[in-house]
Image: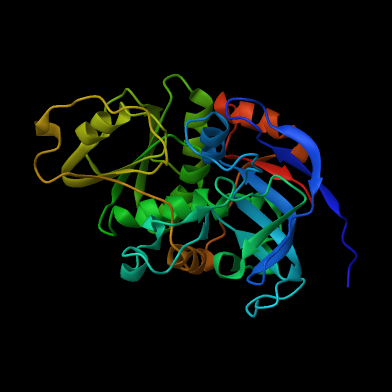
Amino acid sequence: MRHLPATMQAMVLESPGSPLVYKTVALPVYSEEQVLVKVIACGVCRTDLHVVDGELLHPKLPLIPGHEIIGNVVRTGANVSSLKEGDLVGIPWLGYTCGKCKYCLSNKENLCDNALFTGYTIDGGYAEYTVANQQYCFLLSSAYKDPSKTPLLCAGLIGYRSYIMIGENAKTIGMYGFGAAAHILIQLAKQQGKHVYAFTRDGDMAAQQFALKMGAIWAGNSSQQAPVKLDAAIIFAPVGKLVPKALTDTDKGGVVVCAGIHMSDIPSFPYDILWEERTLRSVANLTRKDAHDFFKVITDIDIKTETRLFNLQEANEALNCLRNGEIKGAAVLKIG
């Protein structure tokens, strides 16, 4: 059995609105239902940015952020039966549900009243080791060992939940904000014969060229009118004013999905852009079924993720780059 250290290095949030602190902390203790995981890599998600910047309230403090985790199991709790030492696992945002509330009992565990979330209310993957409940991490094949695969654990999963909400009959799809999630989902949409129209920050030519490279039919500024009426729209950018814009771009009977966990205030808008049976809805978290379905769907699709690698102690730099719109695709902390 491999000898484990008593301590590890981690990036720690001590106070929202302040930079993360690179420090030595105790190796996490795992319970009977948990596994101890040596982290290979952890993606840097926009949700991490919302947590660090204080836009998501009541995080665990001090907190180790990060919820797009790939790593190897190095220890198992006494009651762990589904995983063993050496297994490669992915650890996502959803870290625990109670299984007893009305949401859990109606197959809506993403809305669980007592849920815990990796890198928010429980420590996450900006560290050399982390722990996870055996039922809330996913056994992965060796094909997912590459750090570039980490964005699939959130950008991919939440993006997929958003994508299935627009319905399989949607053929023309607008994606507002072309970052980690959109650049994954466009590959699935393209494989299924959909036409994607990408909307970016006004003047962000680099993002528009990236969207075209990834297969978008058209790419332009978010303020521009869509060149065709859209069957559906997914808003990945945390910008409330995009909601009435997307509704205006969407055809009768279309669906607009707000995919982020945080968004600035939505301005008032006239009823006529919602009328004609357009639907506006949000996405909250994910279910374990979403993950199993997503990884099954992409089995035969060679999903390419555009990533920029950072070392663990460069997490603040990675967050700043994400904050400033300087990341094409996704940022990833390479740790193991």
Q: Relative to 133, is 153 above or below?
A: above
- Residue at the image position 56 percent from the left and 56 percent from the top: 92
Compared across the picture, whether 117 is left or right of 200 comes to: right
Q: Relative to 287, is 77 above or below?
A: below
Q: Relative to 24, is 132 above or below?
A: below
Compared across the picture, whether 35 is left or right of 120 comes to: right
- x and y percent of residue 260 in the render? 41, 41
In the foreground, 150 or 24: 24
Residue extending farthest to the bottom is 81
Compared across the picture, whether 64 is left or right of 207 comes to: right
- x and y percent of residue 203 in the render? 45, 19
- Specify how the rendered protein is coloured: rainbow
Residue extending farthest to the top is 203
- Residue at the image position 34 percent from the left and 57 percent from the top: 164
Observer able to see residue 236: yes
Observer able to see residue 311: no
Quarter of the view holding residue 202: top left
Q: Number of numbered discs present?
A: 0
In the foreground, 7 or 242: 7
Quarter of the view holding residue 252: top left
In the foreground, 83 or 222: 83
Quarter of the image that includes the N terminus: bottom right
- Residue at the image position 48 percent from the left and 45 percent from the top: 181
- x and y percent of residue 192 in the render? 38, 59
In the foreground, 285 or 151: 285
- x and y percent of residue 270 in the render? 12, 27
Compared across the picture, whether 283 is left or right of 81 comes to: left
- Residue at the image position 60 percent from the left and 58 percent from the top: 91
Residue extending farthest to the right is 3
Q: Relative to 209, is 259 above or below?
A: below
